[in-house]
Structure formats: structure tokens, C-alpha cells
Image (cartoon, rainbow, N blue to C red):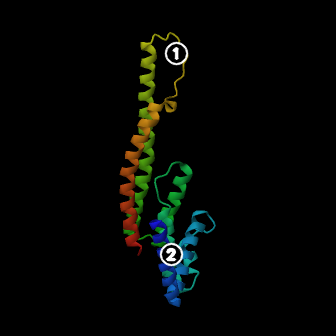
């Protein structure tokens, strides 16, 4: 009950702040939301250049739009699970570079982010392959010890074995933790460089 009350208190406080917000603050908030939407449109291919899309709006709201767009793009930089996610991340990085007008320090940080994402994908593939081979050999040895004369005919899929799932879960958790820590540091630095 206390948690619900505190959430309700937060909602009421926010409503009170909105009631006290100046017209300019509300306009800046709207511009920031528009920037987030422009980032989504960019990521989904509805606009080609984020910088130009923001420049088409009135100058008073451009800074807030830029901040909103940067926030939206940074949310879309994470450790990918597949190629589609990786393509979205690459596009997000390109959007950040575009918004920074290819500033040298931002460009180098973005390269580091891309290196982390690419390194993560390679590391996952490598470690998963090694674990699959290790589990396959273990099961083949067990079959050989049991005297299974027909073991050549048996195809073992190590990824279906409980031992594989358990060990992979542990390895993947450690890997995600390490790579996420590095990625978050670079994202924070990008946020600072781009005025968040």
C-alpha cells in the first residue's frame, strides 16, 4: 500500500509542477518530445538526416529538440541480440554523429561504441561455439563410456542440454555485465558531449 501511495504522491507532485510550469517550459518540453519522435522517425527510415529535420523547425525549440533526439538515439544503443538490432544501433550512432556535425571527439567515442557492439557480437559467437563443442565432447565421452556401439549415428545438439543452458546463462550474464558497463560509460560521455 505504501508503494502505491508514494507513486500517487509522485504523480500529484508532477501534476503540481506542470500546473506551475511556465509557457516557455511547456514549449521546451514539447520540443524535447518532438526531438524524441524525430529520432524514432530517423531510426525507422522516415527521415534521412536528423540534423536537417531539426533545422526545419523554429530556432527557439531546436536545442530542446536536439536534446530529445540525442536521448532517443542513446536509448537505442544497447547490446544487440541479432543483426536487425545491430543495424538499428549503427543507424543510431550515425544519427548521433550527424547531430554533432561530425565533431572529432564525438566521432571517436562513436567509433568506440561501434567497436564494443561488434566485439560483443564476436565474443558471444566465439564463447557460444566453444561451449557447444565442450558440451558435445562431454556427451560423446559419456556415450563412449557406456559402450554405445551406435554412437556415430547419434547426433547430439548441445544447445538442448540442460548443462549447456545453465552454463551459457552464467557466461552470457558475465559477458553482458562487462560489455554493458563499458557501453554505459561511452553513452554517458556522449550525453555530456551533446549537452544532456
The C terminus appears in which quarter of the rendering?
Answer: bottom left
Q: CA distance from mark 1 to mark 2?
A: 65 Å
Left-right relation of 181 to 73: left
Residue assigned mark 2? 11
Q: Residue furthest bottom?
A: 23
Q: Answer with mark 1 or mark 2, whichever residue precedes in sequence.
A: 2
Percent from the top left, x then y, of residue 88?
A: 54, 58
Q: How many marks?
A: 2
Q: Which mark is residue 10?
A: none
Check disc 2 and report its element: helix, strand or loop.
Answer: helix
The residue lying at 36 percent from left, 67 percent from top is 189
Percent from the top left, x then y, of residue 59?
A: 53, 86
Q: Residues within 10 Å of mark 2 (few under 14, many from 20)?
A: few
The residue lying at 45 percent from left, 35 percent from top is 129
Q: Closest to the observer: 22 or 16?
A: 16
Q: Residue furthest front?
A: 1
Q: Which mark is residue 152?
A: 1
Amino acid at each position: 500500500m505504501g508503494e502505491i501511495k508514494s507513486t500517487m504522491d509522485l504523480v500529484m507532485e508532477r501534476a503540481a509542477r506542470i500546473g506551475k510550469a511556465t509557457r516557455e517550459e511547456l514549449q521546451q518540453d514539447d520540443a524535447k518530445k518532438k526531438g524524441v519522435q524525430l529520432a524514432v522517425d530517423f531510426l525507422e527510415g522516415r527521415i534521412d538526416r536528423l540534423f536537417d529535420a531539426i533545422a526545419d523547425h523554429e530556432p527557439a525549440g531546436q536545442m530542446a529538440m536536439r536534446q530529445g533526439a540525442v536521448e532517443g538515439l542513446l536509448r537505442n544503443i544497447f547490446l544487440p541480440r541479432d543483426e536487425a538490432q545491430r543495424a538499428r544501433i549503427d543507424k543510431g550512432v550515425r544519427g548521433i554523429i550527424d547531430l554533432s556535425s561530425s565533431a572529432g571527439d564525438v566521432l571517436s567515442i562513436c567509433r568506440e561504441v561501434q567497436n564494443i557492439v561488434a566485439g560483443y557480437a564476436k565474443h558471444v559467437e566465439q564463447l557460444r561455439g566453444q561451449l557447444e563443442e565442450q558440451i558435445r565432447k562431454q556427451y560423446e565421452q559419456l556415450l563412449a563410456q557406456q559402450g554405445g556401439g551406435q554412437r556415430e549415428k547419434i547426433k547430439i545438439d548441445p544447445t538442448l542440454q540442460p548443462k549447456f543452458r545453465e552454463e551459457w546463462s552464467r557466461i552470457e550474464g558475465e559477458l553482458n555485465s562487462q560489455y554493458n558497463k563499458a557501453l554505459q560509460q561511452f553513452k554517458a560521455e556522449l550525453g555530456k558531449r551533446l549537452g544532456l
